Image: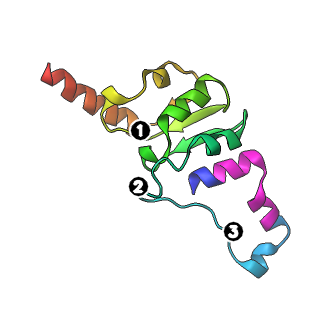
Amino acid sequence: MVVGLLIDVLRKAASDCYIRHGFWKVKGDFPLPHITSLTDETYHMVNKEVLSTLGKEGVIVNVGRGALINEKELVRCLVGEYIKGAGLDVFENDNASNVPEELFQLDNVVFFLHTLLYLLQSLLRRLLQL
């Protein structure tokens, strides 16, 4: 739902019109994606097509499951400035050593506390194995 709302706010899209025109009174709530789990159907559901739709001013925020977003496409879109930025609380792979290095080099990516703690735990485990 967070991603859906953010996209809607930035794009001034359908749900805003839905509310302003009073459609909710007749048709009920506007359907926004609410993703709580990772399944075969939701794996990489934010792909090249979805990221391209965001456009140059688009921002993607993932506080759900890391693998909902195709991380390789996300990196490509961020590096190529096809989207404005990303806020990440999760990664596609739990292991910090598998997070694309490019993400850490980009100024248009913000990491939230959950991700940082996760990374620190993974890095600590990795260091202890050396």
**Of residues 79 and 26, the one drawn nearer to the viewer in this rendering:** 79
Residue 9 percent location from the top left of the image? 72, 49
Mark drawn on residue 38: 2
The crowd level at tag 1 (other Cα within 10 Å; few <14, some 14-19, many 20+) is many
Q: CB under 8 Å between callouts 1 and 2?
A: no
Amino acid on which disc 2 is placed: Leu
Q: CA distance from mark 3 to mark 1?
A: 29 Å
| Among the 4 quarters of the image, the one containing residue 83 | top right
Magenta residue check for 13 = yes
Find numbered disc 2 in the image and state the secondary structure of the residue it sits on: loop
Asked whether residue 102 is in view, the answer is yes
* Position of the C terminus by quadrant: top left
- The residue stretch that appears in magenta: 5-18
Q: Is residue 27 above or below residue 56?
A: below
Q: Earlier in the sequence, mark 1 or mark 2?
A: 2
Find numbered disc 1 in the image and state the secondary structure of the residue it sits on: loop
Q: Earlier in the sequence, mark 3 or mark 2?
A: 3
Asked whether residue 111 is in view, the answer is no
Q: In this view, which residue lies farthest toward the right?
A: 21
Q: CA distance from mark 1 to mark 2?
A: 13 Å
Find numbered disc 3 in the image and state the secondary structure of the residue it sits on: loop
Mark drawn on residue 91: 1
Residue 58 percent location from the top left of the image? 68, 38
* Position of the N terminus by quadrant: bottom right
